Image (cartoon, rainbow, N blue to C red):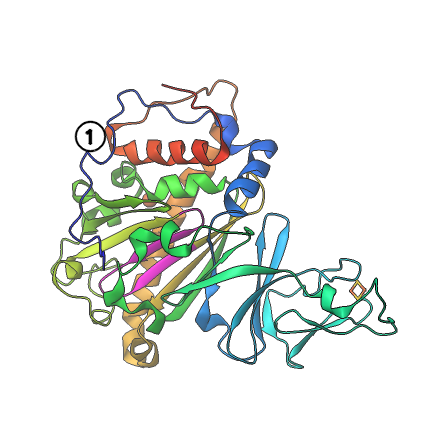
Amino acid sequence: METGKKKFLKRGVDYPIVDGARTLPGKYYHSEEIYAEEIEKIFNKFWIYACRAEEIPNVGDYKTIQVGDESLIIVRDKSNQINVLFNVCSHRGTQLCAEEKGNFNTKAIQCPYHAWTYDLSGKLLAAPQMQESEKFSKVNCSLPKAHVHEWEGFIFVSLAENPEPFEVQMEALIGKFADWKMADLRIAHHIRYELNCNWKLILQNYQECYHCLGVHPLLSELTPVQSAQHDFSKGAVLGGFMDITKERGSMTMDGEAAAPPVCDVSGDDLQRVYYYSIYPNLLLTPHPDFVMFHHITPLGPEKITNDCYWLFHPDVIKDKSAQVGVKSAIDFWDLTNKQDWQVCEQMQVGTKSKRFTRGYYSGREEILHILDQELLKALGHEDPGS
Ligand code: FES
Ligand SMILES: [Fe+2]
C-alpha cells in the first residue's frame, strides 16, 4: 500500500517553479458570486470532512453540519450504520433538527411542524392524517441522503449524486498515517474559533511557513522554518512536515512531548510534525504524541468557523497525571492559532482595498500558487496569468 513516506516533492520536478507567480485577485476572498460557485463546485461536489465517529457513538446520536445552504444530520442507526440525511422535512420543507448535536432518543426523527416521523435511515414511518394515494405514498417521501465514508475515525460526506470514489480523491491519504491508529484516538479538547475571513486564507496560511519567523516565535524555536518540506501532493491532499529540534520533543509550551508516542509511531516520525490539508475543509496535523486538526466551515465569503480538536490516546486522557502535558499542547496551539487568525483577518480586510490588485508569491509560497491553480480549475475560471 502506498504510504507516501519516502516521497518528497522536488521544486521544478513535482511542481513547477513559477517565477513571478501572482496571488489571486482580491475578489476571490470577498465576492458573494465566487463564494456561491465555490459551494456549488467544491463543497457540494468533493468529499468533505463532517465529524468524528466518536462524536456519535450510540444508536440515535447525531450531529448536524452546515454546507453552504444545506444542513445535514449525521446519525447512527440501529444497525450501527452512519447515515447522512438532508435536514429538511419532505412535507413542507421545515428544518427537522435545529440542534448541533444530541440523541434522537425515540429512535426516530420527528418534524416539529406536523409530526411527520422518519426512522434513522430517513424512511418516512408516519404522516398523520395523510391518506395514502397514488399521488402520495410514504415510500416516495424518505429524507434525501448524502454519501458517507469513514477513514481512520473521520467521517467524510459527499453531496454529489455520483461522487468520485473516496479512495481516488484521497489517494495520498490512504495508509499514510496508519501508525497513529487515529480511529482509536479520542478528542481531549475542542475550541471553536469564529473568524472573519475567507476559508481559503486559512488553507493558505496552513501551507506556508514564510510567515513563521515573524508571526510564531515559539513555533520557530521548536521546528526550524528551513526544515519545512512538502512530501505529497495528489488529488485533494497536500502535505508536508517540519522537523522537531528537541529529541522526543513536540509542539507544546515547553517543547517537551505531551505524552508517549501515539500507538505505533516510530523512526523519523518521532521527530516530525506533519501538516496535511485535505481539501477543502480539513487540516490534519499529526504529531508524534497527539493529533491536532481543524475543521473549517465557510459561512459566507468573509466568515468561517474553525473548529480545532486535539486527539490523544484514551490512556492519556484517562491518566490524571498526564493532563499537564495535554494542556501544554492545547495552550501551544491555541496561542499559535490566534497568531495565525490575526494575520488572516487582517489580510481579509486588506485585500478588499481597491489599491490591492495582486501580489507576488515568494519562493516559499509555491504551494499556494498550486492551491490557486486547483481552485481555478475546480471553478472553471480562466487563469489570470502572472
Ligand atoms: S413540514 Fe414537516 S411535518 Fe409538516
Ligand atoms: Fe501559522
Query: Image quadrant of residue 286?
Result: bottom left
Residue depicted at x 50% and y 34%? 379
Q: Is residue 235 magenta?
A: no
Q: Is residue 129 above or below residue 166?
A: below
Depth check: 257 or 141 in front?
Answer: 141
Q: Position of residue 293 (x, y in %)?
A: 38, 57
Picture quarter with the N terminus: bottom left
In this picture, residue 6 sits left or right of residue 216: left
Residue depicted at x 23% and y 55%? 273
- Which segment is the magenta one? 279-294
Q: Position of residue 227 (x, y in %)?
A: 16, 44
Picture quarter with the C terminus: top left
Circle 1 sits on which residue? 12
In this picture, residue 352 sits left or right of residue 269: right
Residue depicted at x 20% and y 40%? 9
Query: Image quadrant of residue 187?
Result: bottom left
Q: Is residue 292 magenta?
A: yes
Residue 289 in sight from this viewpoint: no
